[in-house]
Amino acid sequence: MSDMIRDVLSKRTREIGVWWKDGMFYPSGAEELDKSLIGDTLTWLKDYPSVEKYYRMALDRYKEPKSLADVMTNCYKAVEGMAQNILGNDKNLDKNRNALLARIGLSDKWKAVVANYVAYMHDHRHTRTKNRYDIAPQEVEACLYLTGLIIRLAIRSTES
């Protein structure tokens, strides 16, 4: 059935807003980024089922415009789970941030990018105001892509 769905999608004459991966439909964004930063991330996460669970939940919640805050929360939990896997502990991402940055061995500029991601996601996750739900869809999409990139950085660091 999966092959049949892939075949049907390959014959479409225009963008229909979804793509298919591992038996599930996902909302499409930028096609080039979807394959690399969403599809490949799902493949990389096969060895990290607890992280994959949160990343898939983020993608699933992205289908619903009312659930964008949940996308952000699940992206945070995915990166948090990756940090816990790499560092071998169960500390939250805020407490693991510095150890994670040291472990993945990034330049100071990239450390700043990842640290700002963690701070932004922390602020979003722990905000209990209406503003938490007032988030631009393009920011949520960028968060999904950046989460995939950070996960890849973390995985590559464990390989070397």
Image (cartoon, rainbow, N blue to C red):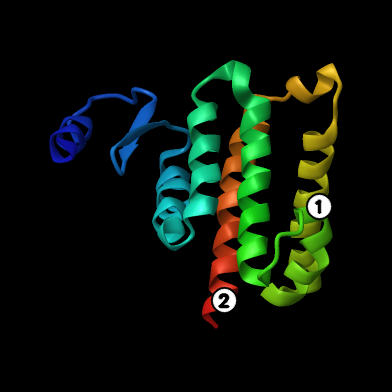
- Say few, some or many: other residues with alpha carbon within 10 Å of mark 2 (under 14 / 14 to 19 / 20 or more): few
Mark pair 2, 1: CA separation: 22 Å
- Location of residue 69 by image quarter: top right
Residue at 78% from the left image edge and 62% from the top image edge: 96
Numbered label attached to residue 56:
none
Residue tagged 1: 116
Q: Amino acid at mark 1?
A: Asn
Q: Secondary structure at mark 2?
A: helix
Which quadrant holds residue 80?
Answer: bottom right
- Height in image: 134 above or below 122? above
Mark identifier at residue 158: 2
* Residue occupying the point 79% across, 62% down: 97
Tell me residue 100's x, y (percent).
73, 68
Residue at x-position 50% and y-position 45%: 53
**Number of on-image labels:** 2
> In this rendering, is residue 112 above or below 19?
below
Pointer 2 or 1: first along the chain = 1
Is residue 17 shown left or right of residue 113? left
* Kind of residue at badge 2: Thr
Foreground of the two, 89 or 94: 89
x and y, in percent, of residue 112 in the image: 81, 61
Left or right, residue 32 beside residue 79: left
Instruction: Tell me if residue 39 can be seen.
Output: yes
Residue 105 visible in the snapshot? no
Q: Is residue 123 left or right of residue 151?
A: right
Viewport quadrant of the C terminus? bottom right
Residue at 49% x, 24% y is: 63
Q: Secondary structure at mark 1?
A: helix
Screen quadrant of the N terminus: top left
Please say if the residues under marks 2 and 1 sit with CB atoms less than 8 Å apart: no
Q: Residue 143: where, in percent of width, then height?
A: 64, 41
Q: Position of residue 108 (x, y in %)?
A: 81, 71
